Image: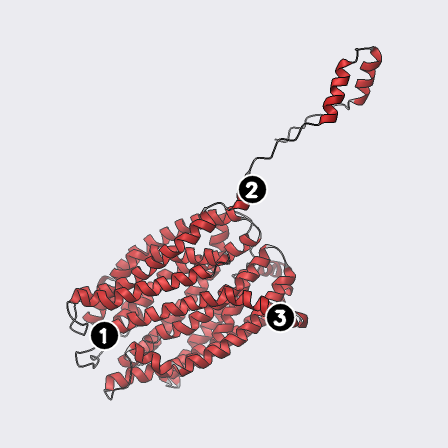
Amino acid sequence: MTGNETRKRKKFFRQSDLTEGTIWKSILFFSLPILLSYFLQTLYSIADAAICGHTLSANEVSGVGDTGSITFIFLQFAFGCTAGMSVIIANHAGKKDAENMRKAFATQILLSIFIIVILTAISLLTLKPLLRLLGIAPTGNTVNDEVFNAAYTYLFIICGGMAGQFFYNVICCVLRSIGDSKTPLVFLAISTVLNISLDLLFIMVCHWGVAGAAAATVISQSFSAVACFIYTVVHYKELRPRASDFKAFNFRTALRTLWQGVPLGLQFSVLAFGLITMQNGVISFDKLPSGEMVAGTPAQIGYGAACKMDGIFMTPLNALGTAMISYTAQNYGAGKRDRIRRGALQCFFMMLIISAFALVVEMLMSINGAYQYIYLARDKISADTIRYGNTYLYSVVPFLIILGILYLERNVVQGLEKPLFPFLAGLGELAGRILVCMFLPALINGAPIDANASSVAFFGLGLGDAAAWLFADLILLYPLIKYVMKKQPEELAENSPAEEPAPNAPQEAEAAVTKSEPETDENVIAKTAEQPPEPDVINMN
């Protein structure tokens, strides 16, 4: 590698100091690698859905698609914990405190091992009850049983191997907290290529079906986690834990770290129960009054394809929000509250532009269900799958700016080390989604929901997302105004005018004596000798 190439590589991987520079540029450029990371994840989802959609049966596709809300419970809890705990590292990074960054990282590693062991055990023990909560259980009916078997197989493998994704999230959040959003992108790109390759191998060559799709995900993410961790401890000396850092582990520091991570993790898990309620409502539109699912499960397939398409346009909003947690935490550590305030406002306007763009593009993509041909084979697309998918899009896309505000508020408040408010917002989001999903569709339909319900009732179900986002926004508005928009006492003290210096009594007395002395030649010579010559005025312009 030439010297020029080495310099370019170092420049690319250089950490971002989010406490300096033009605000909107700092946020945007820091969020771009995160955005590309999320797009790579979306690309994998598209490829995975396309491979499954073209090789598995319609019932197996429905089963895999139905698992999203359950994996959300565990994987998003893990992500919330890692993102929240990394706030402490970002705070030390803002203070340029390398020693405490290293100790915080050591603490986070030990806590992460404990969390993932407990989480894996709980997830494997609760899979069947959670599937029953979704309305998926073996009944002896061919369609029902095939959907259940696909969902259970996929979940068992994903949850059994979630340690790989958990530790990948740990290292990604740590790197972003110190201003490096590019390294996670590189390793995610490697993981995505490996994931798609294994999908093709396991599903299309080995014919492992649903199990192959899950195994490909677990293997690729585990590889990415190990490789990214090795790179981090080699490249960043300030994050290279020593034996003394692990020995310095104490319960007070551990509790502070858990306090930052667990509420955010619980918030995401709580949200999953709202998503389960919505998924249960979607499945109801595929069930006959007898409880049997209709052939082709059009509501589940149409809704699943629409969610994947909408997820593409949620990604930029999510990336900006993720960037704001590191931006806020670093500036909070550096004591630059006004910079946080201006950053939040500028981020909002960026989200407004993205939401308007998403509205136009998604409405165009909904014409004749064009987006469904990306994810599904033609034989799985019907007038009903397009009707259900488009109805969901019409109910959610106009309200994406509400979601953008939620991403902004939640991450800024978390970056200020106020984890309780995002947790309360999660409860509000849960309440909003459950209330709408449980009552509004049946109220619109005038009868219990089944496969004969109207599209308007399905539209009412989709409004559960917008209601959830709005409830959470209103809860987070209080801490945003109090801790961000409103100037804090220390800011007011810094900006208050300095007091006039007290008069110098000895000098005044000396001046009075001097005035009383007669102007003799000796006095004039003495005064001239005491006074230094005035300096030349230098024009600094």
Question: Is there CB contact under 8 Å for labels 3 and 2?
Answer: no
Question: Is there CB contact under 8 Å for labels 1 and 2?
Answer: no
Amino acid type at mark 3: Phe
Q: Position of residue 427 (x, y in %)?
A: 37, 64
Q: Quadrant of residue 441?
A: bottom left
Task: Give the number of the disc on residue 498.
Answer: none
Between discs 3 and 1, the one toward the N terminus = 3
Secondary structure beneath dot 2 equals helix
User: Distance between the Cα atoms at labels 1 and 2?
Assistant: 59 Å
Q: Is residue 43 visible?
A: no
Colouring mode (rainbow / by chain / secondary structure / one colour): secondary structure
Task: Give the number of the disc on residue 249.
Answer: 3
Residue pictured at 32% horizontal, 72% vertical: 276
Q: Which residue corresponds to mark 2?
A: 493
Secondary structure beneath dot 1 equals helix
Given residues 373 and 74, the one toward you in this image is 74
Q: Is residue 409 left or right of residue 451?
A: right
Against 205, residue 425 (above or below) is above
Q: Quadrant of residue 313?
A: bottom left
Given residues 269 and 510, the one toward you in this image is 510
Given residues 520 and 135, the one toward you in this image is 520
Secondary structure beneath dot 3 equals loop
Task: Give the number of the disc on residue 284.
Answer: 1
Q: Is residue 500 visible?
A: yes
Assess disc 2: are there few (<14), some (14-19) or many (≥20) residues with their C-alpha within 10 Å of its C-alpha.
few
Amino acid type at mark 1: Ser
Q: Position of residue 178 (x, y in %)?
A: 56, 60
Amino acid type at mark 2: Ala
Q: Quadrant of residue 214?
A: bottom left
Residue pictured at 28% horizontal, 60% vertical: 396
Count up the numbered dots. 3
User: Distance between the Cα atoms at labels 3 and 1?
Assistant: 50 Å
